Image: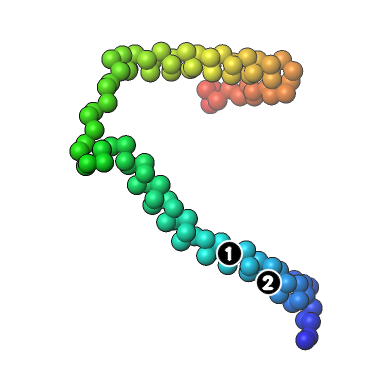
Amino acid sequence: MFIVANPVLGNTLDIKMIVSRLAKPLNVALHQLPRQSARNEINASRRMSGVHFRSGALKPKPGEMPFGLFAILCAVIPGLFVGATISKNVANFLEENDLFVPADDDDDED
């Protein structure tokens, strides 16, 4: 066996060794792929069983929360205020410690 030395690619023996080491894990992964897709189909059918009974009849519609939109607003608005306060405090900290100082470019005056 001849070893061809190429300054760009290295030894051909090294390339063959790399390919041979990658071949087995790739082959194993490709053989496991159909098994995993079959498992996913089984799991999907299990998840969908919550919609109907074993007899095939549909389950009743779940109850709705009466103040759903109000509850969403009660969660989102305080989250926005807390996030804005945290970002303002971090920006002030960075500016006080001269870690980030915005440039004073007067773009309005041309």
Q: Nearer the viewer, residue 96 or 66?
A: 66
Helix, strand or loop under label 2: helix
Q: Is residue 107 left or right of residue 38?
A: right
Q: Nearer the viewer, residue 53 or 26?
A: 53
Farthest residue toward the bottom? 1
Mark 1 closeness class: few <14, some 14–19, many ≥20 residues within 10 Å:
few
- Name the residue that disc number 1 marks: 28
| Residue at image coords 63%, 67% | 24
Residue type marked 1: Val
| Residue at image coords 68%, 72% | 20
The location of residue 68, given as percent across then percent down, is 32, 18
Q: Is residue 43 visible?
A: yes
Q: Nearer the viewer, residue 91 or 51?
A: 51
Residue depth check, mark 1 versus mark 2: number of the one nearer the observer: 1
Marks 1 and 2 close (CB-CB < 8 Å): no
- Name the residue that disc number 2 marks: 20
Task: Say which label, 1 or 2, has the lower sequence index.
Answer: 2
Give residue 3's quadrant in the image.
bottom right
* Above or below: residue 23 compared with residue 38: below
Give residue 16's quadrant in the image.
bottom right
Helix, strand or loop under label 1: helix
